Image (cartoon, coloured by chain):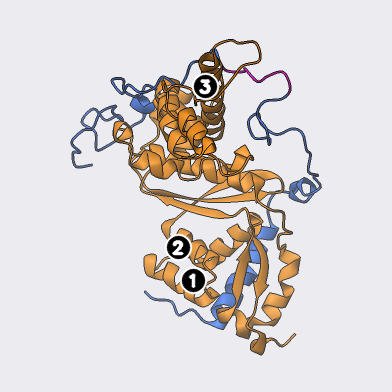
Amino acid sequence: MSPQARFAASLLTPGSRCPPGLMTWNGSDPGRRFDVYRNNVMVSLIDALADSCPVAEALVGTRFFRAMAGIFVCANLPVSPVMAHYGKGFDAFIRTFEPAAGVPYLADVARLELLRVQAFHAADAVPLKSADLAHVLANADALPGARIALHPSVAVMPSPFAIASLWLAHQSDDVSAALGGVDAMRAEAVLISRVGLDVTMFSIDAATSVFVTSLAADMALASAAGRAQATDPAFDIPAALALLLRGEAMIAINFPESMLND
Amino acid sequence: MNKQITAASLAFAFGTAIAVAAMPVAAEEKTMEKEKCFGIAMKGKNDCKAGAGTSCAGTSKMDYQGNSWSFVPKGTCEKTASPTSPSGKGQLAEFKEKKA
């Protein structure tokens, strides 16, 4: 084991002795100094997760959340110094984390919160406005094969749990009262998009969720609409497109080149 | 009912979407006039958590003691309604689901 690997391993093992060869300038015990450093590493990373997932923290309480986050941190050190990107995989970890099994929606709420942070930091792109869509109507013949490029901040999150309602209830002044009206076991889907500079969430139905997910996977418009319709025959295409427009979620509509009339 | 998805129906959908999206919120155009502001990130979301002189921040918290799982999550979970739970609320231990 290299000295670096040994140092890192000691950092992640509470109670372990400090790596051999460490010295202090004034002859004090390097073990104690190393303990301080180790605690700083853990506390700052746990703080980062807590900052990103305040609702998940509220759902289980600070003590539980921080202990859970600490176990995640030990197995998932940051790969970038930018803490906004730290926490990838935290929701998957929660899903398999036995002590949290009694709060089945915890993982999805954490994922929603991480997606919000990602949306906030996603790259800029100029969204399509209604006025930009004139050429779309001029090329109606090519629409079925067209592909919609979504804004980098856009994410879709379907869940078997009422993640949007749970999140929203925690933004209320009286969280307990707001939670009283929430049925956590009801499936919900959320479209996340940065509108202007604000991360915005839209509650969407299952068919719209399939539609936008298909568009995000670069599926042609007709195929994406077809999949959404297969999910729910009542799928409302105009409403879904209006939502994408209003949510500033589209940045381009790309036609198959052979079909352009201009 | 299986509506056919055609070029015409998609053009109609876009036309309707434009009309619907054009209606709302008069202030919306104004909100586009924003600028990126740096240096106002939430704490912990900047590149480096600790600035000069703060290298020992957090040492008194002793958070990293959480190796005991004898405690259960305490939070707002128990206030959250759950139709599959015998008590009608979220529970802090696994429970047998009843039919909702």
Position of A21 with respect to B55 (left or right) is left
Colour in which chain A is drawn: orange
Mark 1, chain letter?
A
Q: Residue at x 73, y 74 (%)?
A: A134
Q: Position of residue B65 (x, y in %)?
A: 41, 19
The relative height of residue A92 versus residue A19 in the rendered view (above or below) is: below
Callout 1 and callout 2 share a chain: yes
Query: Given the image, on which type of amino acid does mark 2 rest?
Result: Val
Q: Residue at x 43, y 62 (%)?
A: A207
The residue stretch that appears in magenta: B52-58
Q: Nearer the viewer, mark 3 or mark 2?
A: 3
Q: Secondary structure at mark 2?
A: helix
- The residues tagged by marks 3 and 2 sit, at their Cα atoms, a distance apart of 44 Å
Q: Is residue A227 magenta?
A: no
Residue A210, numbered label: 2
- Mainly helix, strand or loop, the magenta region? loop
> Which one is in front, A243 or A4?
A4
What residue does disc 3 label? A39
> Which one is in front, B93 or A66?
A66
Q: Position of residue B32 (x, y in %)?
A: 77, 49
The relative height of residue A244 versus residue A97 in the rendered view (above or below) is: below
Residue A257, numbered label: none
Structural crowding at the residue carrying mark 1, measured as other residues with C-alpha within 10 Å and reported as few (<14), some (14–19) or many (≥20): many
Q: Earlier in the sequence, mark 3 or mark 2?
A: 3
Residue A224, numbered label: 1
Query: Given the image, on which type of amino acid does mark 1 rest?
Result: Ala
**Chain coloured blue here:** B
